[in-house]
Amino acid sequence: MIKRNQKLINILNMLSDCILIFFSYYLALFFRFIVFDGKISLMLWKYPYSLAMAIYSIAIVFVYRICRMYGSYRFKAVGEENISISAINGFGIITLMATMYIFHMNNFSRGVLVLYWGISSIIIIAKRFAVRHILHHYRRLGYNQKHVIIVGNGHHAFQYVNDLKNNPQVGITVDGYVSKVEKDGLGKCLGSYEELESILQENDIDELVVALEPHEIHFMKYVIGCADKEGVRLSLIPFFNDYFPSNVRIEKLGKSKLIDMRATPLDNILGATLKRVMDIVGSAAGLIILSPLLIVIAMGVKLSSPGPVLFKQDRIGLHKKPFKMLKFRSMRVNDSETTGWSTNKDPRKTLFGSIIRKFSLDELRQLVNVFKGDMSLVGPRPEVPHYVRQFKEDVPLYLVRQQVRPGMTGWAQINGLRGDTSIEERVKYDIWYIENWSLWLDIKILWKTVFGGFLNSEVIDINNNEHK
């Protein structure tokens, strides 16, 4: 069964990682000295450096093991795994440098070790990418299957079977279901709940998936007891599954288990720190690199119409706290700026304002807000207090957006939901982003924003003039 196969796959995975990490050192030497310098440093190719790299390779694989990076590829998030590999390897290289210094191995090359980190990370990520796709291919063909039995025949049991049909690459086969009543569409009915113990004895399965309905909850203790008695792994689809977000956190208070329904990946201090560091570095770099363009935009705004260069407006940020958001002014000074929502063809826009709005250049000044910590590079778009008060009454889950810093760009924006578009749809995309955040997702959103996300659907109205 799959449990025996998985142990073999894990052993081969660890062994191959160890070998690849070890030989990545020699690739780093090759590129650093032969490709870049055209010469060779024989000392770095021999003992004790080779021994140090062998020990290092075993240690890194051991850390991978501790971080639970060996196991089934069925449900692993690729982006998070890649970030973890890069981070572990980076920490390992820093530790290796410190260790070599302590043991007076002073001839080591820092350039080689930096290359070693990059090459080993790329090779391990590429290997896992290849293994994942090979396994997905064979699972679609019916190999390497995980065999399960479903307990229940209600809505969630059918939903689970349908999800498996839509995701054949996970390689899960339903051998049948257990229920009091037979229903078409779930496969073979193996018997009733009371027969579960004998059913588990007769069927060699990898997992029991429990999908009981609310009125069947009294069977739960018996079902769990049968699974434990027969040593079968058990997974539970709760009857309130449809109300669950993507991420939940369970905390314990005595005998009480508290389910945090609004836990997010950014509750993790490491994730929040990495995101904030990226915001500080990214906004600072953006302000420096784009400073000539910012000066040109400021001059254009000043010459296009009377009034200040910057438009400052109250917006609602993290934890519902207001802040002053900065933009280059794209409209004539008006009395409704605290509540007025711009439209595609807005008569208040100047010609120059239409141009910078078309290419989202008016928002570049928000890099200051990001650097200060009012905003993030990526997140839900901030809204003015007037509309927040309105939307929180009309749009479900609207204020869940305020659990993270608002962003200059976001998942909703790169999917076309910006400007005068459906608030309900925007909130759905924002909630999905919050529940599924990863540094890799932020990088993906920024990439799509830079290469295609700046241009929006706003119309440049050449008929706009100063007397209109």
Image: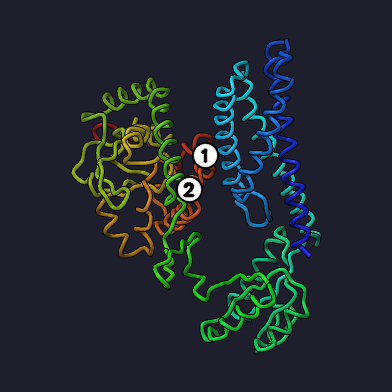
- Viewed as shown, does residue 220 lie left or right of 468? right
Residue 306 visible in the shown view: yes
The quadrant of the rendering that contains the N terminus is bottom right
Residue 246 position in % (x across, y down)? 51, 60
Q: Which residue is mark 1?
A: 443
Residue 462 visible in the shown view: no
- Nearer to the camera, 24 or 423: 24
Q: Looking at the picture, does residue 61 appear above or below residue 169?
A: above
- Nearer to the camera, 173 or 203: 203
Q: Quadrant of residue 176?
A: bottom right
Disc number for residue 411: 2
Residue 272 position in % (x across, y down)? 42, 45
Residue 422 position in % (x across, y down)? 42, 56
Q: Earlier in the sequence, mark 1 or mark 2?
A: 2
- Nearer to the camera, 362 or 245: 245
Say which residue appears at 68% left-offset and 38% top-offset.
58
Pointer 1 and pointer 2: residues touching (CB < 8 Å)?
no
Neighbourhood count class around disc 2 (C-alpha, 10 Å): few under 14, some 14–19, many 20 upward: many
Find numbered disc 1 in the image and state the secondary structure of the residue it sits on. helix
Q: Looking at the picture, does residue 246 appear above or below residue 82?
A: below
